Amino acid sequence: MANFMEMVNWEQLIEATRETIYMTSISVFATFILGLFLGLLLFLTDKGNIWANRTVNVIIAGFVNIFRSIPFIILIVLLIPFTKLLLGTMLGANAALPALIIGAAPFYARMVEIALREIDKGVIEASQSMGATHVHIIFKVLIPESLPALISGVTVTAISLVSFTAMAGVIGAGGLGHFAYLEGFQRNRPIVTLVATIAILILVFIIQFVGDYFTKKTDKR
């Protein structure tokens, strides 16, 4: 037990956990905003909806499909020049954020679109017949009606982002992935890798618990 305690650098583990929480928090917030925007555009510009426009819909759908399909580890490498241009470095927690956001937002956008498609068309038509503006329909009908599904979707996305941060850590982004790879794998300390894995699992369980709580809280059914 004493050997186990000495093998793990607890200060580094705490710092790595903070970096993972930082990367996940910032990227979840940005992903929610960008993904919600893209998802609304996908839904609203589709055939039969209030901003129906096939050209715009095809362009947005193409962007979403392309970035949603690229494996995250490849996306990080592809975005290295952009990250260096934006931040001046490809190392550290901040350097992982562009890839995390660009990788997760299209995924969440599709979940937003699916959630919006589940809304009863009659609710939207009733709002239009009462003279509701497009802004009113978006913020008073579409988002509130799909809120449980939106929260559930952002929970799934947040958990995916935790795993993305672990992958980003392998190429120097910091966090628990970096700690597990550098201090555990490269130094042949499987106990360290195990401890980092447990820390990641705890974060995932907390995110799932909080997400499930708010999903149930906002579900009016």
Image: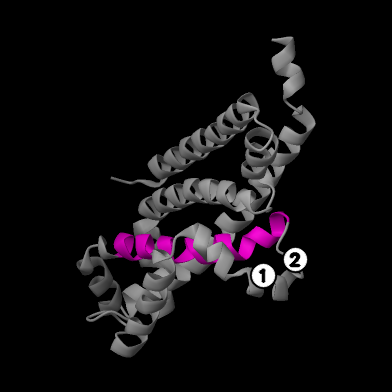
Q: Position of residue 7 (x, y in %)?
A: 73, 22
Rendered position, 94 above or below 81: above
Q: Quadrant of the C terminus?
A: top left
Residue sitting nearer the eye, 188 or 151: 188
Q: Quadrant of the N terminus?
A: top right
Is 101 a magenta residue? yes
Give the residue at mark 2. Answer: 89
Rendered position, 206 above or below 31: above
Q: CA distance from mark 2 to mark 1?
A: 7 Å
Instruction: Please tell me whether the stretch drawn in magenta is mainly helix, strand or loop.
Output: helix
Q: Position of residue 212 (x, y in %)?
A: 42, 39
Q: Position of residue 13 (x, y in %)?
A: 72, 33
Label 1 amino acid?
Thr
Label 2 amino acid?
Thr
Give the residue at mark 1. Answer: 83
Which secondary structure, mark 1?
helix
Corner quadrant of residue 20: top right
Asked whether, in this view, residue 123 is left or right of residue 86, the answer is left
Residue 10 seen by the camera: yes
Q: Which residues are magenta?
A: 92-116
